[in-house]
Image (cartoon, rainbow, N blue to C red):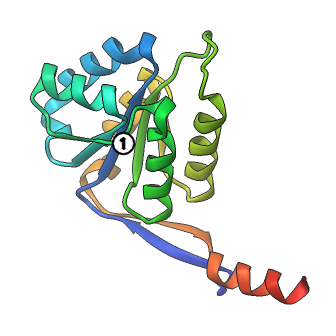
């Protein structure tokens, strides 16, 4: 591998963000309750209302950020950039317009940029949480952004 890329490690104990649009909150809560034994081995966070509801219904500790429309999606995106979130479960509603759709798109984009596993429905979440990678470290490669910025600055 050349210095244009760097390898990051997702640790055995993952930092998992839990997010759901309003019409999908009950489904995510049920999914969390079903997968409680696996989830309690990891650090959980989420957007405000979703985090509180998951904790209330499942007793899983979930650190809450702001509600999605009030910047929670962007807070989680920032945590991805800081290397503090390794895994995103986002039960989204593809059939309903969302007032904060640009924030959602920004979160999804930053997860892709940083090569973060992201599930946007139950089936994908089921596959991810039952993967052998849930119980071990996982190395993934991303662009060396520091080098990329230096190179771009030289050409401007």
Q: Residue at x 18, y 38 (%)?
A: 38
Given residues 149 and 133, the one toward you in this image is 149
In the picture, which quadrant includes the N terminus? bottom right
In the picture, which quadrant includes the C terminus? bottom right
Q: Residue at x 36, y 17 (%)?
A: 25
Query: x and y percent of residue 29 in the render?
Result: 27, 20
Quadrant of the image occupied by residue 48: top left
Q: Residue at x 45, y 49 (%)?
A: 75
Q: How many marks?
A: 1
Quadrant of the image occupied by residue 149: bottom right
Query: x and y percent of residue 32 in the render?
Result: 24, 26
Given residues 47 and 20, the one toward you in this image is 47
Whether residue 29 sits left or right of residue 152 in the image: it is left
Whether residue 13 sits left or right of residue 48 in the image: it is left
Q: Please name the residue that numbered disc 1 is placed on.
A: 17
In the displayed orientation, state which residue is furthest to the right.
156
In the displayed orientation, state which residue is furthest to the front.
70
Dot 1, how many residues are within 10 Å of its Cα: few (below 14), some (14-19), or many (20+)? Answer: many
Query: x and y percent of residue 137 in the render?
Result: 32, 63
Query: x and y percent of residue 61 in the render?
Result: 14, 39
Given residues 148 and 137, the one toward you in this image is 148
Quadrant of the image occupied by residue 10: bottom left
């Amino acid at each position: 591998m050349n210095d244009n890329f760097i390898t990051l490690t997702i640790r055995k104990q993952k930092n998992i963000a839990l997010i759901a649009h309003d019409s999908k909150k009950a489904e995510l809560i049920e999914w969390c309750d079903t997968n409680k034994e696996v989830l309690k081995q990891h650090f959980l966070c989420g957007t405000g209302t979703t985090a509180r509801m998951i904790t209330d219904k499942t007793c899983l500790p979930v650190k809450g950020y702001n509600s999605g429309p009030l910047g929670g999606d962007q807070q989680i995106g920032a945590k991805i950039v800081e290397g503090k979130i390794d895994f995103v479960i986002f039960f989204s509603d593809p059939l309903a317009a969302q007032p904060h759709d640009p924030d959602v798109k920004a979160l999804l984009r930053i997860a892709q940029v940083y090569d973060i596993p992201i599930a946007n429905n139950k089936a994908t979440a089921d596959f991810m949480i039952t993967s052998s990678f849930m119980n071990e470290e996982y190395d993934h490669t991303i662009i060396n952004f520091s080098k990329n910025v230096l190179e771009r600055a030289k050409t401007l």
